[in-house]
């Protein structure tokens, strides 16, 4: 059921950070005006149309002609960071992106979007410690200078920070502390071949005896993630991404009270969005109030549209193989029956 509200299978849009800069450029904080360079406006239009190559050409020309124009550097660095390869030996675009984003931040240190893009670039370069440091700095800028960005921009920034914290949380939430691992035993074997192949068990256990207890590390990462998603919703109560991510984790942790309140608030903020109803239905189903769950699911499916509705009405995956084949080959009336 959790897959219904996207915990483990999150579709990450490659252009998410580009979308943020488009938002920053087109929203009320920094509107597109006649004062903006023509090359910059052209690059925005080309990005919106999906022509990255043409946009990059205009942005490179812009940074040469107007080297003190921060948005030009920021857009150039962000686009390059998005399309740059993560392979260790393919670093040319990452270097150019890094240089451009640092120049943008130097010219406009109150714009956290440049730090956000730089942190994401560092993460692509496997520089996780530096990435977290830069992203935390972006977080401080958002907190200390909230007037510098619109509520929509602030929500998007917090959402991106939440996604980064979520990835760390998903990596750390099941860590366990084993102070004296029984090497060459079935217990050790359940952890994989590493223990079985270790030839010096005394040294092995001595090393881990002095290691830090990381079993609570995931809780800190959860709080950081949840705080970012909550702040995104404070800035924009109708932010569907922040709502769906946060409420899914709360349901997974059996925190049905906060999940229910979040879903009700989201329904009020976005009454035409199906996920407020689908999620509240899931909460009611988890706590055993099936009649309320059914009503919420029905309303959510009604709002969701044909593709999503047909997916949730499809019962073939819970049928035996033969029945599933007959179900999939039946007409609409028979499938509904």
Image (cartoon, grey):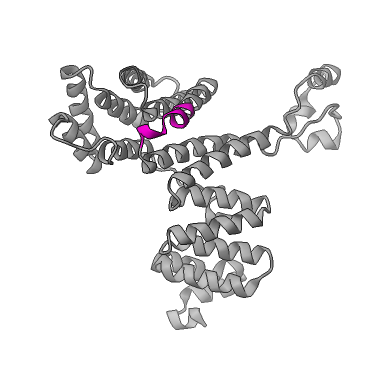
- Vertical position of residue 214 compared to residue 14: above or below: above
Residue at the image position 35 percent from the left and 38 percent from the top: 20
Can the viewer see residue 270?
Answer: yes
Q: How many marks?
A: 0
Q: Quadrant of the N terminus?
A: bottom right
Q: Is residue 145 magenta?
A: yes
Judged left or right of residue 102, residue 230 is right
- Vertical position of residue 54 compared to residue 253: above or below: above
* Image quadrant assignment for residue 219: top right
Residue at the image position 67 percent from the left and 50 percent from the top: 253
Task: Locate residue 125, reporting x and y percent.
Answer: 46, 23
Q: Which residues are magenta?
A: 140-149
What predominant SS class does the magenta segment belong to? helix
Q: Is residue 326 magenta?
A: no
Q: As rendered, which of 108 and 14 lies closer to the eye?
A: 108
Task: Locate residue 232, reporting x and y percent.
Answer: 47, 43
* Image quadrant assignment for residue 282: bottom right
Can the viewer see residue 314?
Answer: no
Judged left or right of residue 232, residue 36 is left
Task: Locate residue 247, reporting x and y percent.
Answer: 57, 52
* Image quadrant assignment for residue 269: bottom left
Judged left or right of residue 330, residue 103 is left
Task: Locate residue 304, reporting x and y percent.
Answer: 42, 65
- Vertical position of residue 71 compared to residue 303: above or below: above
Q: As rendered, which of 28 and 53 lies closer to the eye?
A: 28
Residue at the image position 47 percent from the left and 61 percent from the top: 268
Judged left or right of residue 175, residue 34 is left
Residue at the image position 46 percent from the left and 41 percent from the top: 159
């Amino acid at each position: 059921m959790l897959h219904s509200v996207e915990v483990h299978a999150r579709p990450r849009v490659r252009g998410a950070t580009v979308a943020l800069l488009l938002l920053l450029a087109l929203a009320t904080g920094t509107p597109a005006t006649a004062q903006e360079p023509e090359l910059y406006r052209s690059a925005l239009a080309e990005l919106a149309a999906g022509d990255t190559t043409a946009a990059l050409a205009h942005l490179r020309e812009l940074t040469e002609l107007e080297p003190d124009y921060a948005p030009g550097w920021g857009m150039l660095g962000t686009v390059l960071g998005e399309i740059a390869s993560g392979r260790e030996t393919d670093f040319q675009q990452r270097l150019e992106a890094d240089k451009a984003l640092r120049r943008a931040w130097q010219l406009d240190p109150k714009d956290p979007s440049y730090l956000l893009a730089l942190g994401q670039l560092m993460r692509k370069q496997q520089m996780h410690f530096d990435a977290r440091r830069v992203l935390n700095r972006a977080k401080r800028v958002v907190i200390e200078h909230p007037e510098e960005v619109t509520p929509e921009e602030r929500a998007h920034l917090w959402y991106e920070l939440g996604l980064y914290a979520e990835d760390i949380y998903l990596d750390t939430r099941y860590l366990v502390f084993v102070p004296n691992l029984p090497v060459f035993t079935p217990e050790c074997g359940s952890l994989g071949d590493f223990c079985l192949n270790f030839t010096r068990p005394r040294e092995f256990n001595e090393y881990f005896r002095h290691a830090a207890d990381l079993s609570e590390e995931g809780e800190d990462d959860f709080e950081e993630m949840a705080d970012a998603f909550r702040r995104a919703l404070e800035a924009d109560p109708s932010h569907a991404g922040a709502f769906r991510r946060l409420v899914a984790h709360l349901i997974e942790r059996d925190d049905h009270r906060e999940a229910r309140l979040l879903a009700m608030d989201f329904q009020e903020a976005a009454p035409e969005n199906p996920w407020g109803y689908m999620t509240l239905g899931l909460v009611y189903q988890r706590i055993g109030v099936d009649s309320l769950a059914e009503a919420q699911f029905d309303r959510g499916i009604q709002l969701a549209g044909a593709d999503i509705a047909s997916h949730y009405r499809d019962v073939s995956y819970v049928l035996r193989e033969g029945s599933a084949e007959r179900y999939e080959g039946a007409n609409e009336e028979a499938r509904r029956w």
